[in-house]
């Protein structure tokens, strides 16, 4: 019935002007594009987005750039140039959302800051992502992912107790900020349906790190003890960590007393559930080394897959510790169409990456057959000129008249 409609996302009809670069902003606008928004990426002359120079490269094109800029259009604009400012004004007239992740003040100096656009284009949702937001004593400081991971505390909790603090294996600071920015934009778009007014969305990466610290802040406030690194175990649940098997390590997450009893039975060691030191979750947390040693006496006798089968049959959450290559053939990810292909332009070689994880009734899931294009630098300039300036000749004429 609605085959063509089902190809579109719920944000169809929303236009996003994306001034952002590197990761936090582009990841946010990638999610918006995945959900059906039209995203026009505004890039700088010469190099474009910094990540176009980041490896790995496929046929000379950055796979890093492809992953986070799929499904977008690219145009190079010099917003100090009168002719490009005219085009940008027309783009702003039609845009619903502006996203930027410059340091505070950069967009203001260019003449396109949030305060100015609130007056001239009050319908626009203006989203800024920066290291520390647009207020507070650190607002002017540069903030990269590594900086906010350190400052926000997550590094102090990552790693093993006898080792140094460690960076989280992905850009946790950038990605967290990107997703909070997406939530803020969607909330502002919803509010606009009620009052026809745009809004300012101000995202600080450090704020987002604090918000993602789970219970670490509350634990310190309640107990007066600074949380520290616990390796791969959970500070409040046990067993909730990895254990040695014959051929590697297996994660077992028996997060309550019932699951612990089921785990003990599945391991063929029901006596574990009767041990006085392991009777409750609190006791297991306090006696974690003894508990882990008792479990590993059993798990070391068989291979990982043996225990995976036994534990899954009993309904106990568990997993092998997969390396990244295993994800491409993971039956659950494949069943959910989570592995997609992206390529640069129309003819570039495709690379595989993760697709949109949001499933919504009435809309199609990821297309796993046809690669999604990430734009080459300035690829859509002529198309955008014809659409927003009537024709390139008219655009050039208007520039000549202005000069």
Image (tube, grey):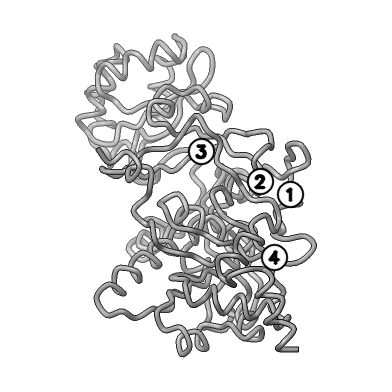
366 sits left or right of 26 in the view: left
Nearer the observer, 5 or 171: 5
Q: Earlier in the sequence, mark 4 or mark 1?
A: 1
Judged by depth in the image, the label closer to the viewer, 4 or 3, is 4
- Determine the residue positioned at 27% across, 16% down: 313
- Position of residue 81 measured from the top left corner of the image (x, y, whole percent): 73, 80
Residue furthest to the left? 258
- What is the distance, in whole Å, between disc 4 and disc 2 at their CAs? 19 Å
- Position of residue 31 measured from the top left corner of the image (x, y, whole percent): 46, 53
Q: Is label 3 in a helix, a strand or a loop?
A: strand
- What is the distance, in whole Å, between disc 2 and disc 3 at their CAs? 12 Å
Where 179 falls versus 317 (above or below)?
below
Labels 4 & 3 near each other (Cβ < 8 A): no
- What is the distance, in whole Å, between disc 4 and disc 1 at their CAs? 19 Å
Q: Earlier in the sequence, mark 2 or mark 3?
A: 2
Judged by depth in the image, the label closer to the viewer, 4 or 1, is 4
Residue to which mark 4 is pinned: 76
Residue to which mark 1 is pinned: 54
Nearer the observer, 97 or 268: 97
- Determine the residue positioned at 34% across, 81% down: 197
Query: 10 Å neighbourhood of mark 2: few (<14), some, or many (≥20)?
Result: some
Q: Earlier in the sequence, mark 1 or mark 3?
A: 1
Residue to which mark 3 is pinned: 354
- Determine the residue positioned at 45% across, 9% down: 301
Residue to which mark 2 is pinned: 64
Q: Is label 2 in a helix, a strand or a loop?
A: helix
Labels 1 & 2 near each other (Cβ < 8 A): yes
Labels 2 & 3 near each other (Cβ < 8 A): no
Query: 10 Å neighbourhood of mark 4: few (<14), some, or many (≥20)?
Result: some
- What is the distance, in whole Å, between disc 1 and disc 2 at their CAs? 6 Å
Q: Quadrant of residue 189?
A: bottom left
The circle drawn on residue 244 is: none
């Amino acid at each position: 019935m609605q085959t063509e409609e089902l190809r579109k996302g719920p944000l169809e009809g929303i236009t996003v002007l994306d001034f952002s670069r590197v990761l936090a902003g582009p990841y946010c606008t990638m999610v918006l594009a995945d959900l059906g928004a039209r995203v026009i990426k505004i890039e700088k002359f010469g190099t474009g987005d910094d990540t176009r120079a980041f490896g790995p490269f496929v046929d000379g094109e950055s796979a890093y750039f492809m992953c986070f800029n799929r499904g977008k259009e690219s145009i190079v604009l010099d917003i100090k140039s009168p002719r490009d400012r005219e085009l940008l004004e027309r783009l702003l007239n039609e845009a619903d959302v502006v996203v930027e992740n410059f340091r505070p003040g950069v967009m203001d100096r260019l003449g396109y800051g949030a305060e100015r656009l609130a007056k001239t284009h009050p319908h626009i949702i203006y989203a800024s992502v920066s290291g520390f937001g647009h207020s507070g004593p650190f607002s002017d400081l540069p903030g990269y992912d590594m900086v906010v991971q350190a400052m926000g505390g997550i590094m102090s909790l990552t790693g093993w107790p006898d080792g140094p603090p460690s960076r989280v294996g992905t850009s946790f600071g950038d990605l967290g900020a990107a997703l909070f920015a997406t939530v803020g934009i969607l909330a502002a778009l919803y509010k606009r349906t009620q009052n026809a007014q745009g809004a300012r969305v101000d995202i600080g990466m450090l704020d987002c790190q604090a918000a993602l610290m789970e219970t670490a802040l509350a634990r310190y406030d309640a107990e007066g003890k600074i949380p520290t690194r616990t390796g791969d175990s959970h500070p409040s649940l046990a067993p909730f960590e990895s254990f040695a098997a014959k051929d590697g390590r297996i994660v077992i997450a028996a997060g309550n007393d019932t699951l612990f009893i089921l785990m003990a039975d599945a391991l063929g060691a029901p006596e574990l559930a009767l041990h006085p030191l392991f009777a409750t979750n609190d006791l297991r947390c306090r006696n974690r080394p003894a508990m882990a040693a008792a479990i590993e006496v059993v798990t070391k006798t068989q291979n990982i897959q043996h225990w995976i089968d036994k534990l899954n049959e009993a309904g106990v959450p568990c997993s092998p510790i997969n390396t990244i290559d295993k994800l491409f053939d993971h039956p659950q990810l494949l069943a959910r169409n989570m592995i997609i292909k992206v390529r640069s332009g129309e003819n570039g070689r495709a690379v595989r990456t993760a697709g949109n994880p949001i499933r919504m009734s009435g809309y199609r899931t990821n297309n796993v057959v046809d690669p999604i294009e990430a734009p080459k630098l300035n690829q859509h300039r002529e198309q955008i000129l014809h659409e927003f300036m009537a024709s390139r000749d008219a655009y050039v004429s208007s520039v000549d008249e202005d000069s």
